[in-house]
Amino acid sequence: MRLFKALVVALLLGLCGNSASASELEHEGTNSGGFQEEGGLEEIEEIIGEDEEEEFTREDVTCGFMMMGMFFFIMVIFYFVNYPDDDIKRYSWSNISTTISIFCAILIFSAADEVIVVFVISPVLGEFPKGWRQVARVAAGYVIFIAWLAVAEVMIAYFAKAFCVSSRPDGRMAWVVHDSIRGDHGVPLQDLDSRATATVLPGTREKSIAKIGQLEVFVTMEDLEKEAAQRRTKSWSMLYAHMAGFAMISAGGDLQHSDFFRDDWPNSLLAVLLNVLFLLLVFWVSARLRPRGDESDMESDDEGPVEMWNENAIESEDELFCLSISFLLVQALRFQASGVLSTKAGLEPGENFGTMAILTVYGEALLFVVATVVVVFSGRTGRLADLLRGALSMAFAWCLLFASRWMFESWPLLVKLNCPPKSIPGRLILSLFLSSFAFAVIIVLDQIEDAASNEDRRVTHKIVKNVVTGLSILVGFTWETTMDGCAEAVFSTIHENERARLVSKFMGVVVILLIVLPAWRRYVLHTVFRLLKHQRDQRAAQKLADKLQRLDPKLQEDGLLDMSDSEESAPDPELTC
């Protein structure tokens, strides 16, 4: 920019010199003209020298690191979502989907919770209540959780259409374009442009080739209403489950910070046990309140609205249980390792912990992984086993997050650059580091799953699935913390008043969600469902091939059945037709 300015100054000096009158030149004399020319050259050299000696500020370095890191991270994401291995591609999309869900859920809950606390609870009970006011504050937290859970149950039933089972639709089967490269992927053939003629090969049932204009396109027969209801119910149940989970974390945090439970870490663990019993009681009551499906629907393969409601409600309850109990458990364990009880958000203001505390939490993360493997190999089945396995895997993720945050607090390079994890650049660096670590772990876990034998494949898949779920929670929470800090920094410059700032933050969150939520539901979650369906089709084909091979072993010997690449590539559409 300064070089451009120097060129402009030189051009103006030249024009001024050419346009000067002869009388002025004679009056000024030769020395004066030389002085002007020399002064102009000195000005140009000074400007160019300033451009060469420009120094970068701390803000320039921070922005440079941020842009380079974000560009690198986006490219890495493209590698993973287009990975040639189907399992890694599915895990990557699931990780991204869970991250966005947690990001949206905690934004909604934190904004709503802050508004309720500032405008309702604090004026009535005080900011730091004592005595009976403290008991009332803890009870209010659990009432808020019950309200979030009730809203989740009602919304799941609504989107599953369980309130109108008498008018249950018969379904709308239609041929759908099944080509992810095309812009009309997932669009029924009858909904395409009327000028395009679509013809399906005769004699086909589920998969075929359609001729759209002069181009042949792969199509599948799908139940549009059923799949739309499943996607809609799954997306909202996941979102409300995470919001209810964070409400439970807030309520359990209030209990842990009450006078009796905050004295030492065993009492904090006791608060975790009380929350476990409370959630199990709530789940038992909700199961009694939900209607049971018809026996005819239970016996058939077609999933009815009531069955869809029950299935997604149970999954939501399990998700919020694992999310909240694992967080509260890690809070108590960090209390034991550091001697400081963290805030409800997991922060320790003004505290720096030593190497022993960091290694202790990292060791606890490793122990949680070992415990998850032990529970899976024990062969225990049922809902309690699923809850235990999920809580252990998420506790591993929470330990990894907080230990890494403590490590970044004492990292000399970040201390020198003044980028602690509490700052915006520090949060961004931590998010990039943990996200890269999560994707690297996914690759290692997939290699372990592929190397497992057929007998151990199911057990290994359970372990990998639980660890990947925990890593998704880890990545989602770190990026939400980063975005929340960015929002706080932006809105702090707009309003100095606390209430006005909260209202502005709430409106900003609404605008963000209006952009993020539809994109997540339409594109990310839809891709996850498509990959899961592809996995189910592969497993069904593998089971059928194994059954045929047991019935007639000569099929494999004669070359009529070749399943050597069945787990790594999808079947050829032409052969399927």
Image (tube, helix red, strand yellow):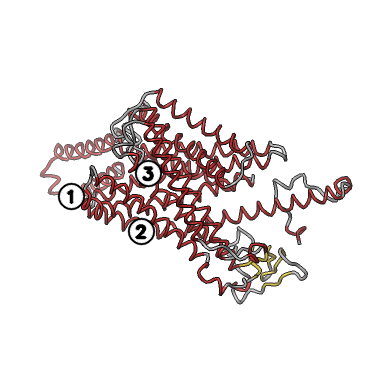
How far apart are labels 3 and 1 at the CA level? 83 Å
The answer to whether residue 489 shows anywhere in this view is: no
Residue placed at 51% from the left, 30% from the top? Answer: 366
Percent x, y of residue 64: 38, 39
Mark 2, secondary structure of its residue: helix
Which residue is most to the left?
27
Between 26 and 321, the one lying in front of the other is 321
> Pointer 3 and pointer 1: residues touching (CB < 8 Å)?
no
Give the residue type that dot 1 points to.
Answer: Ala
Give the residue type that dot 2 points to.
Answer: Val
Quadrant in which the N terminus is drawn: top left
Percent x, y of residue 260: 31, 36
How far apart are labels 1 and 2 at the CA level? 64 Å
* 205 is higher (above) or lower (below) than 125: below
The crowding category of the residue bearing disc 3, from other C-alpha atoms within 10 Å (few below 14, some 14 to 19, many at least 20), is: many
Residue placed at 83% from the left, 48% from the top? Answer: 549
Give the residue type that dot 3 points to.
Answer: Gly
Quadrant assignment, res 342? top left
Closer to the chain start, of discs 2 and 3, is 3
The crowding category of the residue bearing disc 2, from other C-alpha atoms within 10 Å (few below 14, some 14 to 19, many at least 20), is: some
- Labelled disc at residue 20: 1
Mark 1, secondary structure of its residue: loop
Q: Is residue 459 left or right of residue 346?
A: right
The residue at which mark 2 appears reads as 510
Between 519 and 29, the one lying in front of the other is 519
Q: Is residue 541 left or right of residue 368?
A: right
The answer to whether residue 507 shows anywhere in this view is: yes
> Pointer 1 and pointer 2: residues touching (CB < 8 Å)?
no
Closer to the chain start, of discs 1 and 2, is 1
The residue at which mark 3 appears reads as 252
Closer to the chain start, of discs 3 and 1, is 1
